[in-house]
Image (spheres, helix red, strand yellow):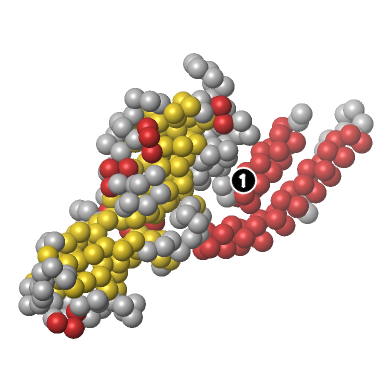
Amino acid sequence: MSDNNHLCLLGLIFLSSLLTGVSGVDDAHVFISSGEDVRLPCNNALQDCTSTTWLYNRYSTFAELIRLGRKRKDTESHERLSLESDCSLNIRNISTEDSGSYICQQWTGEGGERLRPDARVYLHVLHVSSSHTEISSGLSVTLFCRLFSYTGVSCDDWIRSESIHLFWVNQAGVKSDSRYQISSSSDHCIISLNKTLLNEDHNREWRCEVTQRDQVKTSVTYTVKSSAEAGSTTSVIPVHSTHSQDPSTTNTHTIKEILTILKTAVFTAPTVILLQIICARRAGRKDSQQPGEIEINTII
């Protein structure tokens, strides 16, 4: 192959990569409330899950949960794990300790070769707690809402990279109320709601929501209920709400990124076609030249 044709091929490969805009397997983000069951997708799965290995990473150390399609019996979460036919990982009764990074790999066998790029899933667990287990009218109470994630990434980094935010909202879905004081922390993804309870707060709901790029992923609702045994004493009862999607398997590509890829395609596609025409014409002239002739490059 001539140098000109080689350059044309490299140009086509480069422009084609601009059109696709993606290489490898996208990371996924899954949001769940503590106490619920979750499914983690394996985006690099093969038809036969006997090649599938699942790893868990939270404190910069890896634990093997699934090896070549079989559960490891020496893990604490062994009884709560199961593997679906599409190689996705099911975890029952999620706790905050289950948050972190999960990696799905495909191997040819023990000591074999990796068949596909790793597929990573970040599991974020939403948990709400109260400063008091039993409360009464006039008592100052603080509700803590925290999102547990992979410890290797700070909350500020999640906000910048994935636009992840926490909000407290009332029964009407309003994010602010003059009666309540809301504070947050940049070190941990945590937001607290401080309030002094009134009599009319009985049966009132407060909901903590986690959003990613302005879409609600999961939430936990706290309701103040009257206690029959304690008379005027009330207790705060957590109620886990349903997910806004199935089940929070969000890839990192957003609508904005898709539009960017489409815009790139609109402007890049004509260039690809033009480069193909140039390569074809040069190849044709090269074949039609007689020995000793000099090729004259023209600008189209």
Identify which amino acid the numbered label 1 is placed on. Ser
The single residue placed furthest to the top in the displayed view is 111
| Quadrant in which the N terminus appears | top right
Q: Residue at x 30, y 67 (%)?
A: 221
Q: Residue at x 10, y 76 (%)?
A: 232
Q: Residue at x 80, y 49 (%)?
A: 277
Let me know if residue 239 appears in the view: yes
Q: Is residue 228 placed above or below 44 in the rendered structure?
A: below
Q: Nearer the viewer, residue 73 or 253?
A: 73
Let me know if residue 182 appears in the view: no
Q: Nearer the viewer, residue 28 or 127?
A: 127
In the rendered image, residue 127, in percent from the top left (x then y), is placed at 27, 56
Q: Residue at x 25, y 77 (%)?
A: 204
The quarter of the picture where residue 196 lies is bottom left
Q: Is residue 88 placed above or below 199 in the rendered structure?
A: above
The quarter of the picture where residue 57 lies is top left
- Can you identify the residue that label 1 sits on? 17
In the rendered image, residue 251, in percent from the top left (x then y), is placed at 49, 52
Helix, strand or loop status at disc 1: helix
In the rendered image, residue 233, in percent from the top left (x then y), is placed at 11, 72
Q: Nearer the viewer, residue 26 or 137?
A: 137
In the rendered image, residue 226, in percent from the top left (x then y), is placed at 18, 73
